[in-house]
Image (cartoon, grey):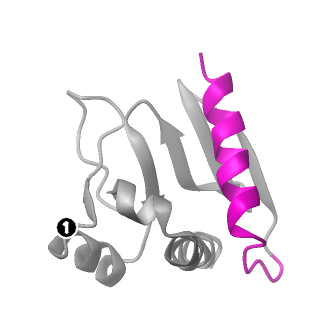
Amino acid sequence: MAEPYLTQLQQILSKIGPLITGNVTLEAKHFFSGAALYANGKICASLSPAGFALKLPDDARLKLLAEGKGTAFRFFPSGPVKKEYVALSDAILEDKQFLKELLDLSTIYVAG
């Protein structure tokens, strides 16, 4: 069940071009019923039936929520809100440049 999400995540990453990594090692792999992008072994993004979510610093996450570009994220419908994550809107997923900027920020935030 998770295989399509891993393939989809890898396709998203290939479409936006290389991320700013510095000394950060990135790895995409299966995660529960979806896939996750790991930065130095820590999850910075996930793609699953719950949507595409990024772990972001408070200011960036709150701005996305306030602008309606993201929603509070839960891995499971009845689960708790993942406080550092935001589920991205479809509009962001279509905007390759903005998505890349957010993924760069997430990678740096998690690995930092």
Q: Is 69 located above or below residue 80 in the figure?
A: below
**Is residue 62 on the magenta stretch?**
no
Q: Is 2 located above or below residue 20 in the figure?
A: above
Q: Is 79 located above or below residue 64 in the figure?
A: above
> Helix, strand, or loop for circle 1?
loop
> In front: 77, or 15?
15
Q: Position of residue 84 (x, y in %)?
A: 35, 62
Q: Residue furthest left?
A: 66
Looking at numbered disc 1 in the image, what kind of residue is underneath it?
A: Gly
Q: Position of residue 7 (x, y in %)?
A: 71, 36
The residue that disc 1 covers is: 68
User: Which stretch did the figure color magenta?
Assistant: 1-23
> In front: 63, or 100?
100
Q: Position of residue 30 (x, y in %)?
A: 67, 32
Which quarter of the figure has residue 25? Answer: bottom right
What's the residue at 41%, 65% (across, down)?
Answer: 92
Which quarter of the figure has residue 14? Answer: bottom right
